[in-house]
Image: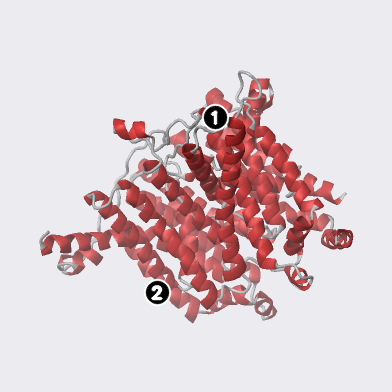
Amino acid sequence: MKSLLNIIIPLCAVLPALALGAIMLVALGADPLSGYATMFGAAFGSLEGFSETAVKSIPLLLVGVGICIAFRTSVINIGGEGQMVTGALLATTVALAFPGLPAPVLIPLLLVAGAAGGACWGAIAGSLKAWFNVSEILSTIMLNIVAVQFMNFLLRGPLMDPAEVARGTGIPQTMRLSPNADLPILIEGMRLHLGVLIALLVAVGAWFLLWRTSMGYRLRAVGHNPDASRYAGISVPVNITAALAFSGALAGIAGAILVFGSESHRMVTDGSSTGFTGSAGFNGIVVALLAGLHPLWSIPSALLFGGMLVGANALQRAAQVPSALIIALNGLIVVFVVSSDYFKKRLQPTVWVDGAAEEEQRGDSDE
Amino acid sequence: MSDSVAVMIVVATIASGIRLATPFLLASLGESLGQRSGVLNLGVDGVMLLGAFGAYYTVLKSGNLYYGLLVGVALGIVLGIFYGFITLKLHAEQGVSGIGIYLFGLGMSDLLFQKFVGTPRPIFPFMPLRFPVLSDLPVVGEMLFQHSIIVYIAFGLVPVMSFVLNKTTYGLNVRAMGENPEAADSLGVSVMATRYSAIIIGNGLAGLAGAALAIELGIFQQNLTNAMGFIAIALVYFGAWSPKGVMLGSLIFGLVQAIVLQCKTFGVIPRSASDLAAMAPAIITILALVVVARRFRQPAALTKPYVRGG
């Protein structure tokens, strides 16, 4: 019952955001009903549309699941953007270094590289919090900035496409990466690629980690009550660092998939992080919040937001409403979902006690 | 290179560093006031973007730069009221809801820009002020006395903020909210009113910072601030929550930017190296955060919602 309430209240919080979105549509001279219908139709109305939606939701799901792990450890990871970038950079470098490897070896290697790149970036923020008492909110934001500039440096310098250098056009992008690194297309003629399955697998894996392993138990225990955890012999610093490393690893995989699942099959920068990630590092937070910080509920949540992105592009074509509307709406959804905690606590004032009791029982059976 | 040319370049760099520091300074002064009252606002960048667009659009339509500044402040105040409501009344998690405000500002400013402006058109920035005698002084004149009015407003706010925080009842109340709201409440000081006012002023300053940026650059574009608002938040920690410290941090940031720009213009360093140099401020901030976390203490009640009897 409790977990149902965890889902229903955030969902209700989406309604005022959608209502505000409708008001914005009216203000922009578009019919809100047909506007939302256009969006929904484009995102879920056809197999092509759904394939597009699924592809767009991959980074959202991966980052969102990572956020679930971090937030459940009471670590606020705002660094998804930077972790996606570092993961993508490391994976791209590996792809450039070993272009000849066969796909079945190369692709797993690239995913591991992506995870490692993101994990390192997350672990920096984690260890700064754990051992130097630096707020992870600030350090992850700063690390985002560092990662973007490092990406710009690499793509304008050492990793730049030799053809661009020769031509002197200097577009900051890598060469066409090895075809062996292309993520295989699942349905002929559509964009749906292997990344979708990877993301789903990761979501299930994260659920398993959090609720079926002692590692996950320790993470959640640290999130619930660090003092009690310390008393029980759980290392708080180690678990904080681990949570950010996990979270970063998933964002890193998302970054790698963005590169190898892209249509151009190269890594490109426009100088900003949004240009590469499409703000997935931030939007993943929205996905996780809407899913009540549950990795499995994150799947439909990511699909919803992926669909909104696809729908927004359709709306831009059909009604000349700039697709930036969706970013603004996502912001409102974050605000409303976070604010809805207030109502959740009011509706079920014992929720916290229940949770703690449940944890205790699980703890007994775990250890 | 002759000495006089070198002096000219140094002077120009410092002058541009002061100009570049201005939006950081305004935004981080506002953020520090909010944090002093115990409220963290991560949405600064979004508020700046909306303020920047509002100011840009107003100037484009009216031609009056002061209207632009006012609109920037007004938008900041509106968002401040909204943010105050969700964090103070609804107790929303401050680290996350701020990101919501950021995304809202990022999307909304871009949306409005594309819908109502479309192709970027430049606006004319403020003329530099001329002070009799002072502006004509060699070296110092160009460095300090040939800036636009907004620069003087920003730096003028530093002593004002110091005075208000340290020497007035209101400042004492704000600091009490950040340290021990229970005690302040028991003495009859309204936690809500004090925090609301600090957030609203803080967001107003963030809106002003955005307006100053757009007017200084004479342009608006998608994501104009490029994470400046986030750096402004870090500067609050960098400056250990004191207006003077925040000013020092902003100046360092402005100068580093100016030096990087200058080096780029003169081709002293290649483009790629300037990307590496652009990492410096963020890395310095991270290191500063380590030092600050050890030596200074953040306001004790920061990010903690106040529940009476809770």
Instruction: For mark 2, give the secondary structure.
Output: helix
Give the residue displayed 50% in from the left and 73% down from the top.
B292
Q: How many marks?
A: 2
User: What is the quadrant of residue A202 in the picture?
Assistant: top right
Circle 2 residue: B159
User: What is the quadrant of residue A189 in the picture?
Assistant: top right
User: What is the quadrant of residue B63 in the picture?
Assistant: top left
Q: Amino acid at mark 2?
A: Pro
Circle 1 residue: A180
Q: CA distance from mark 1 to mark 2?
A: 62 Å
Give the residue displayed 89% in from the left and 59% down from the top.
A365
Give the residue displayed 73% in from the left and 52% down from the top.
A340
Q: Residues within 10 Å of mark 2 (few under 14, many from 20)?
A: few
Is B185 in front, or is A226?
A226
Q: Amino acid at mark 1?
A: Asn
Residue A15 appearing in the image: no
Tell me the number on the disc at residue A237.
none
Image coords of residue A304 (percent x, y): 68, 35
Instruction: For mark 1, give the secondary structure.
Output: helix
Q: Relative to A299, is A329 on the left or the right?
A: left
Image coords of residue A239 (percent x, y): 69, 62
